[in-house]
């Protein structure tokens, strides 16, 4: 079935960040997200889900395992289960990206210290 961002289920998270659920089933999740300038998510990890973050526009910073990695447009990074991580937008403009999780990460998020 064809899906569009304008038809996808929308939600707001964090500090005025947006998410659009493009694919949601037990084995796979694909979410298009937007983070305004100078926002971030809480550091966390997943027990089962492996994730791939892919930047569509803007510049994001991934804090993964205590190391910061800059992701420019058309760049991505894989995060294995049990690895603490968080995405930050330290820039002055919005960043839009895809988060692909297998299996689906809903209910699999655990807050990490530091």
Image: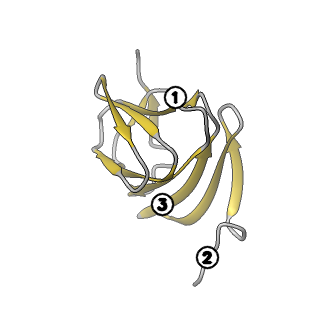
Residue 87 lies, with reference to residue 30, above or below; the image says above
Packing grade of label 1 (10 A; few <14, some 14-19, many >=20) is some
At x 32% / y 47%, what residue is drawn? Answer: 77
Dot 1 falls on a residue whose secondary structure is loop
Do the CB atoms of the residues marked 2 and 1 lie less than 8 Å apart? no
Do the CB atoms of the residues marked 3 and 2 lie less than 8 Å apart? no
For label 2, the residue is: 3
Q: Position of residue 85 (x, y in %)?
A: 38, 32
Any mark on residue 90, and which?
1
* Real-space Cα separation, disc 3 to disc 2, in angstroms: 13 Å
For label 3, the residue is: 29
At x 71% / y 71%, what residue is drawn? Answer: 7
Do the CB atoms of the residues marked 3 and 1 lie less than 8 Å apart? no
Q: Nearer the viewer, residue 92 or 1?
A: 92
Residue 71 lies, with reference to residue 37, above or below; the image says below
Q: Position of residue 9 (x, y in %)?
A: 69, 62
Q: Position of residue 70 (x, y in %)?
A: 36, 36
């Amino acid at each position: 079935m064809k899906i569009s961002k304008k038809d996808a289920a929308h939600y707001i998270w964090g500090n005025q960040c947006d998410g659009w659920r493009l694919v949601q089933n037990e084995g796979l999740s694909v979410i298009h997200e937007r983070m305004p300038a100078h926002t971030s998510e809480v550091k966390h990890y997943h027990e089962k889900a492996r994730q791939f973050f892919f930047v569509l526009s803007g510049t994001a910073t991934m804090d993964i395992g205590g190391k910061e990695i800059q992701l420019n447009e058309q760049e991505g990074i894989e995060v294995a289960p049990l690895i603490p991580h968080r995405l930050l937008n330290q820039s002055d403009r919005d960043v839009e990206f895809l988060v692909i999780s297998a299996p689906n990460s809903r209910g699999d998020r655990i807050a990490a210290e530091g």
